[in-house]
Image (tube, rainbow, N blue to C red):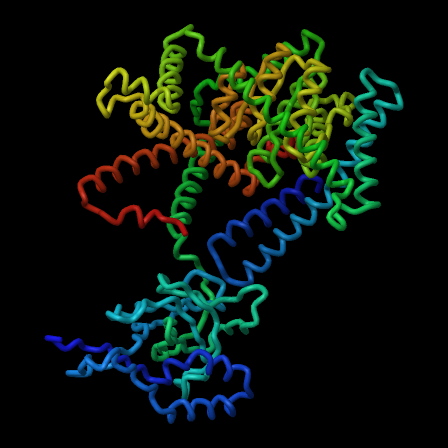
Amino acid sequence: MRREVPLLFTVVFGLLMIVDFFVPHPFIADWAQRFRDWAIIIIAASFFLGVANLVKINLHKVSRREKEWPFAAALLGSLFVTLFLGLAFGIADKGGIRGVFNSIFLYMYTPMQATMFSLLAFYIASAAFRSFRVRSFEATLLAVTAVFVMIGRVPVGNAMSDALNLPDGLTFASVQAWIMDFPNLAAKRAILIGAALGAIATGLKIVLGIERNYLGEGGAGK
Amino acid sequence: MTSAKPIALVLRPARLVTFAPLVSLARLAPHGTIAALIAALTTLAPPAPPTLAQSESDIITEAPPPLELAAPYNVEAADTPNDRGQSITVRWSAPPVVEGVPPVSGYEIWRAEGSAEPADDYEGIEVGDAGAEATSFIDTRRDNSDVPPLENDAPYRYRVVALYQDGTAPSPWSEPVAAAHSMFHAGRAVALLVLAIFLAFLVAFILLAMRGRPLFIRKIAGLSAIEEAVGRATEMGKAVLYVPGSQEVTDIQTIYSMVILHAVAKTVARYGTPLIVPIGKAFVVPLAEETVRQGYLDAGHPEAFDPRNIRYLSDEQFAFTAGIDGIMMREKPAANLFLGSFFAESLILAETGFATGAIQIAGTANIHQLPFFVVACDYALIGEEFFAATAYLSREPRLLGSLKAGDWMKGAIILLFVVGAILMSTGAVPNLPDFFRVE
């Protein structure tokens, strides 16, 4: 029963969603929408599980003074302080004065998030440096292509094209546009079609109960 | 003055000019009383006085015919196809442009109940409006609207009122039409056809595989390397980090990542290596816990499962990223597996992992993140390779058969591309793309 019941639910609800895509009859559409609403409610309720997991693990670290436990303490402190401020004073601004909760979000969380995101610029540079090292034919091809695309997308590329008096179809901008619109787009679409088919096949395998290794041994039908 | 200057003598029927405000008033009045009175008065009202000549020297030689405001024509109402009913689509042709008359500024769409044509212009209700460029309108249930919804199988008539700067011009009422629900979405027939072909491939190859026919699958380096990565972590006495993406469980990649996680958990359990699974969506926590627990159970080491290694970090994208970076920098896992749906965090994670010296295997179907994983990880599962993981790792006949069915489907699509390109290029079937369009 431990495997059959989840499998039954998966098959029934999965097939209903597939039927809903093809049959717009209100009976099917209403039930499908109802189940989608249930999913939203269940997912929203799962935040409690997430917070419980977070508190349990970090409280354990702090109580046992595990290595680098102050990080766990800082996390728990931030969690409870923000939670308290939000519950006690609300999250809305009052009388034109920004609330404490909003201030935390705007002046602490947002800059920290931006900091993390801005790291991406440096990581792109370091990853590009490694990948553009000319070690093989493929790497050389990648590096040369990247140079054309990068130069073709910045104003200096146009200036260089003018200085070299390149014909219209062979300017850096034209070459980069051709690379992006033809070889690059063709490869992207090929990967996309493969991935989409893989996703459809996986969905069908799970819905039809073919893929059930996650249910444990015996679930795979061995 | 040598020539007579004709005067634009515009006589508009007063009824058309005053139509809109009267109708508005009629809608406020008790049904059929004031509305009828206003209609009668409007009909009897004398025409507006003509515009006088600009100067006495202007001589009226011949009065041009009055310029009437043109109404929309060809008004047709039909049940909206492929829907759950309670919806009617109204189409019309824009009134012809008349020289000297300002263009239409918009349309009002009116609905009347019953199959009989309304006795006068003021029956019915306005159900919506449309812009000057519109030639169709869908009358359907709208939230926060006072307009009563349509009933299925009940007759309705429609007309379209053209709005001008100086008045309005209503079309005749359409033929009666009834809304009905559809049993099948005809606009998705081709999707059903493709699904049916795919299912046929699936069943055929699964049957072949189960009868023992060997099915060749090319070597996928990234999947072969998972065991190697776990072995390396075991030798170094460090943990394996498994990140199942940053998206919700409604994403098929997250679901499939759980399936791969089960296989990875079994492997690490056999080796006795710790497995850390940071989670970015709260709902994934119980799924990951249960999956890893099951993996350890299937490997025969349920006692080795540590629920504290399934760690919910944050639903916020970069807080989640920062949390994983912290785990990588502090606990230095020897192998990082990034398998799931990733967005901007992909390169931040992969580069941090590279800095720690871990062996890294990544896989995603998000093509915009693939380049980052390809350059920053040791192995990358590109698109469909990600979805081949369980079949490749387990070699279970049914899964191998499904993988082969996907390959054949891809072959069929490539064939379709070639045939379609030829047909389109030669102009043999110009409307071919319409056949494959899914609504």
User: In the rendered image, is residue B397 in sight?
Assistant: no
Query: Image quadrant of residue A186?
Result: top left
Which residue shows up at 45% across the image and 36% down it?
A: A196
- The residue drawn where x is 30% and y is 73% is B73
Q: Quadrant of the N terminus of chain A?
A: top right
Position of B203 compared to B233: left or right?
left
**In the rendered view, does B104 fall on the left or right side of B349?**
left
Q: Examine the image and state in which quarter residue B158 appears.
A: bottom left
The residue positioned farthest toward the left in the image shown = B2
Residue nearest the viewer, comparing B150 with B91: B91
The residue nearer to you, when weighing B56 against B403, is B56
Q: Residue at x 87, y 18 (%)?
A: A65
Across and down, in percent, residue B254 comes to 59, 34
Q: Position of residue B353 (x, y in %)?
A: 62, 16
Q: Quadrant of the C terminus of chain A?
A: top right
Considering only vertical position in the picture, is B189 above or below A208? Answer: below
**Count of marks overlaid on the render:** 0
| Residue B213 horizontal/vertical position (percent) | 43, 27
Q: Position of residue B255 (x, y in %)?
A: 60, 35
- Residue closer to the observer: B434 or B112: B112
Q: Nearer the viewer, residue A109 or B178?
A: A109
Please give left or right for residue B34 compared with residue B294 in the image.
left
Q: Is residue B133 visible?
A: yes
Q: Is residue B95 above or below residue A155?
A: below
Picture quadrant of residue A62:
top right
